[in-house]
C-alpha cells in the first residue's frame, strides 16, 4: 500500500486525459449575461398556468371515466 507513482513518461494512467488549453471559443471578448439580454413583454406567459390546469382537469376526467 504505497503511494501511487506516475509512469516514467509522465503521462499517468490515461494519456488521453492530458491538461490542455481549449481554443475553440474566443475568450478575449466578453458578452452580457443571458439575464441581461433576455426580453419579455408585460404579461407574457400568464396564460400557461390556466392552460395546464385545463389539461390536467381533462386528463383527470378521462382517467376517472376509464376507471369507472
Image (spheres, helix red, strand yellow):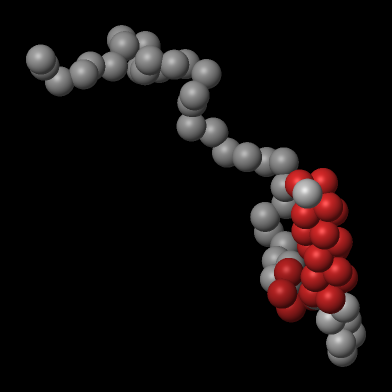
Q: How many marks?
A: 0
Closest to the observer: 11 or 66? 66
> Which residue shows up at 52% across the image and 18% down it?
16
Classify 37 as above or below 68: below
Give the farthest residue toward the top: 8
Q: Residue at x 31, y 11 (%)?
A: 7
Q: Is 13 located above or below residue 26 in the figure?
A: above
Which of the image's four quarters has the N terminus? Answer: top left
Left or right, 13 with reference to 15: left
Looking at the picture, how far across and down is residue 19, in whole percent? 48, 32
Q: Is residue 40 visible?
A: no
Horizontal placement of 25 versus 55: left or right? left
Is 19 on the left-hand or right-hand side of 42? Answer: left
In the rendered image, residue 64, in percent from the top left (x then y), is placed at: 78, 54
Q: Pick out the residue farthest to the left.
A: 1
Q: Nearer the viewer, residue 38 or 7?
A: 38
Q: Quadrant of residue 4?
A: top left
Residue 18 visible to the viewer: yes
Q: Nearer the viewer, residue 66 or 41?
A: 66
Q: Position of residue 23 (x, y in %)?
A: 68, 41
Q: Nearer the viewer, residue 65 or 31?
A: 65
Q: Residue furthest front?
A: 68
| Quarter occupied by residue 20 | top right
For image coordinates 87% across by 89% down, the residue present is 42
Tell me where residue 2 appears, x and y as whole percent.
11, 16
Amino acid at each position: 500500500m504505497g503511494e501511487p507513482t506516475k509512469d516514467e513518461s509522465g503521462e499517468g494512467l490515461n494519456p488521453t486525459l492530458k491538461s490542455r488549453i481549449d481554443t475553440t471559443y474566443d475568450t478575449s471578448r466578453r458578452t452580457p449575461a443571458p439575464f441581461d439580454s433576455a426580453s419579455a413583454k408585460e404579461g407574457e406567459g400568464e396564460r400557461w398556468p390556466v392552460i395546464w390546469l385545463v389539461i390536467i382537469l381533462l386528463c383527470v376526467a378521462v382517467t376517472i371515466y376509464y376507471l369507472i
